[in-house]
Image (spheres, rainbow, N blue to C red):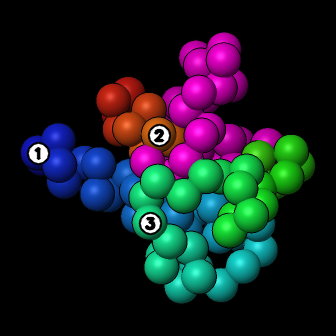
Amino acid sequence: MSDEQTRADVERVIRALLAEAVRVDPAAIDRLPADTELFGPEIGLSSLAGVTLLTAIRDRYQVDVADEDLNLDSLQSIATLRDFVAERV
């Protein structure tokens, strides 16, 4: 699988997990650009929803974002989280 395909697959899954974590219709998350901030007003990821999201990512990809990214820079946007996870799968 190409890097581009991996990134696309990871983004699709992250968007679904994100929708589940913030309890919104997945279509609402799918419409957002990849550079949408996770903790910004469009998504409004709370700390509890963030933990739910990171646990789901760890369970799905065996990537522990909180453990591997001490500054949590990967949680800036959908794209930064996608790239972080895609580089590790």
Q: Is residue 55 magenta?
A: yes
Residue assigned mark 1: 2
Image disc number at residue 71: none
Report whether residue 64 is seen. no
Mark 2 residue crowding within 10 angstroms, few (<14) / some (14–19) / many (20+): some
What x and y, as percent, mark residue 15? 52, 64
* Residue visible at 70% across and 42% down in the picture: 55
Q: Identify whether 47 is placed above or below 40.
A: above
Choose top left, top right, bottom left or bottom right for residue 23. bottom right
Q: Nearer the viewer, mark 2 or mark 1?
A: 2
- Local SS, label 3: loop
Q: Nearer the viewer, mark 3 or mark 1?
A: 3
Tags 2 and 3 touching, CB below 8 Å:
no
What x and y, as percent, mark residue 12? 41, 64
What x and y, as percent, mark residue 41? 74, 64
- Local SS, label 1: loop
User: Which amino acid lies under the numbered mark 2 shown in the image of this protein?
Assistant: Thr
* Residue visible at 60% across and 61% down in the picture: 17
Q: Identify whether 87 is placed above or below 47.
A: above
Q: Identify whether 65 is placed above or below 81.
A: above
Residue assigned mark 3: 33
What x and y, as percent, mark residue 3? 17, 41
Q: Of the two numbered discs 3 and 1 on the same chain, state the one appearing first in sequence.
A: 1
Q: CA distance from mark 2 to mark 1?
A: 19 Å
Residue assigned mark 2: 80
